[in-house]
Amino acid sequence: MSFLINPYIFGLDLGFWTNLLFTSGKIVTGFVATFTDALTVNWGDGTTTPLTSGVSVNKTLGTTNGIELENDNAVVTKIICGTSSPRLGGTINLSAFPNLQEFRCNSNDITALSGYAQNSNFKNIQFFDNKVIGSIPSLSALNNLENFYCYSNQLTGSIPSLSGLIRLQNFVCHSNQLTGSIPSLSGLNDLQNFSCLQNQLTGSIPSLSGLGNLRIFYCYSNQLTGSFPSLSGLNSLIDFACYSNQLTGSIPSLSLLSNLRIFRCNNNQLTGTIPNLSGLNNLQFFYCYSNQLTGSIPNLSQTTDLIDFRCNNNQLTGSIPYLRDCFFLENFVCYSNQLTGLIPNLSGAYVRSFYCYSNQLTGFAGENVSGYISNSLGDFRAENNLLTANAVNAILAAFVLANKTTGTRILNLGGTGNASPTGQGITDKATLISRGWTVTTN
């Protein structure tokens, strides 16, 4: 059995790498083979090394004919090519290794990988971060496949059918040039991670019903249309991202998704309201901005792990909800809506950025109460509202009392509709400026 690397040919007998492009001095780091019987690696420069199954080997390549694995009796079940500096290129054909269960050749510059689509022994195939061109072949024969990672290549064509791959856990094909639609995921009950983001996919998001083990679903930055599928029953779901598509319809119910941490559906054409978020105790990031949503911002008092909430550039009405129970909240962004009422108490959370500009807000909940601004808050934009002079004065006083003198310090209370500060407000503005703040008022 041979596994040969040379400047022009990689593959004799049972070798598989052809047209390998490298120069002497490249450092191959972490080459691993798992096998039966003894194997020797011939480095092609007059030196040989006995291999121990499963133990990684590092080698600076010489100037001769490359690398060959020698022993026709060995059964190779795993090959990990490792990485090289500079990166290795060329094409790989795995058809000479019918017993392979795992192949990994990541972060090199290979341009083609073939010879694996009929090997039903495969459990793990990884060739991400290369320059592989062409399409993904039919995977229908790989009925033991658990993991398929082909992201960050130059693949074209469509995602093949995944039907029958009942052991599939991770399918990650993002950052290619794939077209067509997302295939049916029905019956893939073990699926945990499906990521097809940053391609050129069209059509709709398929049904996710029955995928009780699904943890991550990424389909953002494509050209998807249609409406959301139901997310009910996805009790393991942690991270869902479908932003930067052309999806329509409403955001589905998120109730009972108790493990959900990240939900991002921004930059679509969604209508309807933001669903009830009560009970999502693990929710940390919620992005629904740049849609056509109406209704009010839901109650956030139970989303106590919330870090970042963004609903800007919609058509939301009503008031900004109570935020003091969101102790970890760092960013709250609700600008360019039609919100009314008061800016809420911001003292309990670790807020760093609060953007509520271009609404119709009239006041500040702390107009008569000190300590309503956290010392962490240093980027506050409320321009283009309907703030009264009392509200403007109270906000300035609250920031003076918070006494932030380091980090970001931007306070904008100007723009159309807001009143100018008066009396002590003018003095407080000067105090903040003396502390390094950039303060804008009318």
Image: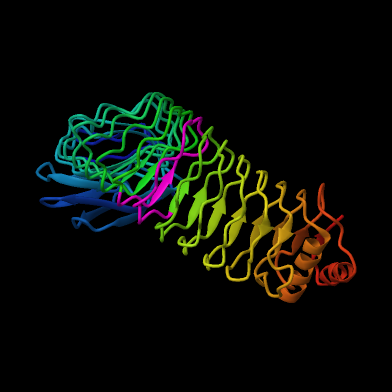
Q: Quadrant of residue 392?
A: bottom right
Q: How many numbered dots are placed on residues in this image?
A: 0
Assign the magenta stretch its main secondary structure: loop
Pick the residue in front: 124 or 49: 124
Q: Residue at x 28, y 34 (%)?
A: 185
Q: Quadrant of residue 110?
A: top left
**Does 436 sit above or below residue 252?**
below
Q: Position of residue 276 (x, y in %)?
A: 45, 50
The span picked out in magenta is 235-261
Q: Residue at x 81, y 53 (%)?
A: 418
Pick the residue in front: 431 or 145: 431
**Residue 245 is covered by the magenta coloring:** yes
Relative side of 249 to 423, left or right: left
Q: Residue at x 30, y 51 (%)?
A: 235
The answer to whether residue 61 shows anywhere in this view is no
**Residue 395 is covered by the magenta coloring:** no
Q: Position of residue 413 (x, y in %)?
A: 79, 56
Question: What is the quadrant of the N terminus in the image?
Answer: top left
Q: Quadrant of residue 75?
A: top left
**Does 237 sit above or below residue 397?**
above
Colour scheme of the picture: rainbow
Pick the residue in front: 189 or 71: 189
Relative side of 13 to 44, left or right: left
Q: Position of residue 127 (x, y in %)?
A: 35, 40
Question: What is the quadrant of the C terminus in the image?
Answer: bottom right
Pick the residue in front: 267 or 29: 267
The answer to whether residue 331 shows anywhere in this view is yes
